Amino acid sequence: MLQDVVRWGCFLVCMAACVESANILFVIPFSAKSHYISLSPIGLELARRGHNVTVITAIAEKNPPPNYHQVMADSPEIWDVLGTEKPNIFTMADMTASEFQDKILWTGGLAMTEVALKSKPVQEFLKQDNKFDLVISEQFYQEALNVLAYKYNAPLALVTTIGNCMRHNLLVGNPLQLATIIGEHLQIRHPSSFTGRLYNMYHVVRDYLDWKYSFLPKQEALVKKYFPELSEAPSLYDIQRNTSLLLINSHFSYDTTAAYLPNIVEIGGIHVTNQSLSGISPDLKKILDESNHGFIYVNFGSNVKSSELPIEKKNTFLKIFKNLKQTVLWKWEDDNLENKPENVVIRKWLPQKDILAHPNIKVFVSHGGLIGTHEVIYYGVPVVGVPIYGDQYYNIVLLEEAGAGKLLMYHDINEKTLGDTLNEVIHDDSYRRNMKELSRRFKDRPMSPIDTAIWWLEYVIRNQGAGYMKNPGRELSWIALYMIDVYVVLAVSMVGIVVAITKVVKLMRSPKSVKKNKKQKAT
């Protein structure tokens, strides 16, 4: 009897320890709304499950749980910190991946990191005597903030908003798989072709070297400037190399299948499955319900504004839309749209998930951002994608390869290409069927994306960083990790063997050797 009491007592103590709330620091100060939409569900869900969450953010959450504490960072637009006027985003369609990296991401990421660190509320927070069981930080050009894991002696978990991160793969010894997995922001139509693999390797290696030897030292300078008390902290390279967990915003059901270490976990669609629909306004609902031929939804995201379309492109869209039987619902950021056809309805803001969930929707005309891509997959809506920058091209190519959408390059837009592409996706039912199948696979998981993320974050906390999940290969040089030294020795040995055999054969065939053989036969 006493043994049973003790056993049950131990069980209850263990359960209490397992569900005890943790102190978690969530670092997401980048001011882009799309990033916040993708990341905020993690912090909010952790708080709803009883954890004490402190979030460093540039975007305030309305009506958060009482145990969700917000430290507000300044929130300028990236163009402000770059010291340039905001361009017409459609002009960025001309940028190569390297130009986008060099002109926007490296410089902007560094500047936005410093904006966060010198924000007064953040400075006041850092002076406090806080303790955390886990630090979660966005993996997006803000490496100086990873030093907070060292400051609070806590495991570090990273989370991406753009899927796989090739630099992190190199850092922690995850297989690169360059023959099939392309680097971020690249526009490669056929990754497995020779030219595709060659360009992919060039970009990935160049990106890694630029990051390690140019960008990372500048982030180190921010650590020295804003954390002078952490003079003995490991390098940012080593801090990230010892990351306990990386949550990536992708899923094998639609993305290229890849091999991952156990501490790299896919959570693609995390913002879709955890939020209820907000509801369409009655007037708009009436319009969509009464669209007998269905409707087309046009939205280029929060950063790319349709109202900035050059006049010739805008007129092309209007001419094509005018000839369609379907209603066109267009997110248009200005009050008026000149020469708007009767079947076109404009709004400055639209509840996108509600629109995509409506039964009368036929096609989504999109820029191919990852948030919208996950939403169309979840709701099973075919896509006509017009990529502008970043990962958008790759996202649309994945849908096109699945037969669930069509790629239309921005500079290729004219009345024929736009009309043909729209009509094909509208009238060919295979696009809808293929997208519905993609949706079914996307949803078919043992746990929802948010449950997956929370389970693994809590796993890291329960297991004090779960160091045993980390690849021991991260401690090796790249020469040892990728067996370059072994291959060189084998190659040299093979060459040596071939040379030796060649010399022996030549020696045996030499005149002296032949003459000697003849003499031996004569005797």
Image: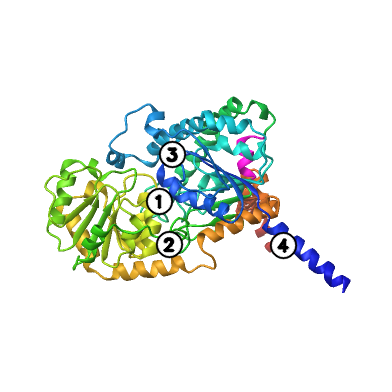
Mark 1: amino acid: Gly
Q: Residues within 10 Å of mark 2 (few under 14, many from 20)?
A: some
| Residue 254: image tag | 2
| Label 3 sits on residue | 31
Magenta span includes 100: no
Q: In the image, residue 301 lies at what x, y percent?
A: 33, 48
User: For mark 4, does the 10 Å Cα neighbourhood hold few (<14), some (14 to 19), or many (20 or more) residues?
Assistant: few
Mark 1 → mark 4, Cα distance in angstroms: 52 Å
On screen, residue 206 versus residue 13, left or right, reads: left
Residue 109 lies left or right of residue 479; in this view the side is left
- Name the residue carrying label 4: 15
Q: In the rendered structure, which disc, 2 or 4, sits on the residue that comes first in sequence?
A: 4
Q: Nearer the viewer, mark 2 or mark 4?
A: 4
Q: Which residues are magenta?
A: 234-242
- Is residue 184 visible in the rendered image? The answer is no
Please identify, in this view, whether the residue under mark 3 or under mark 1 is nearer the observer.
Answer: 3
Give the mark nearer the N terminus: 3 vs 1.
Answer: 3
Tell me the distance, in whole angstroms, between the alpha carbons under discs 2 and 4.
38 Å
Residue 9, can we see it?
yes
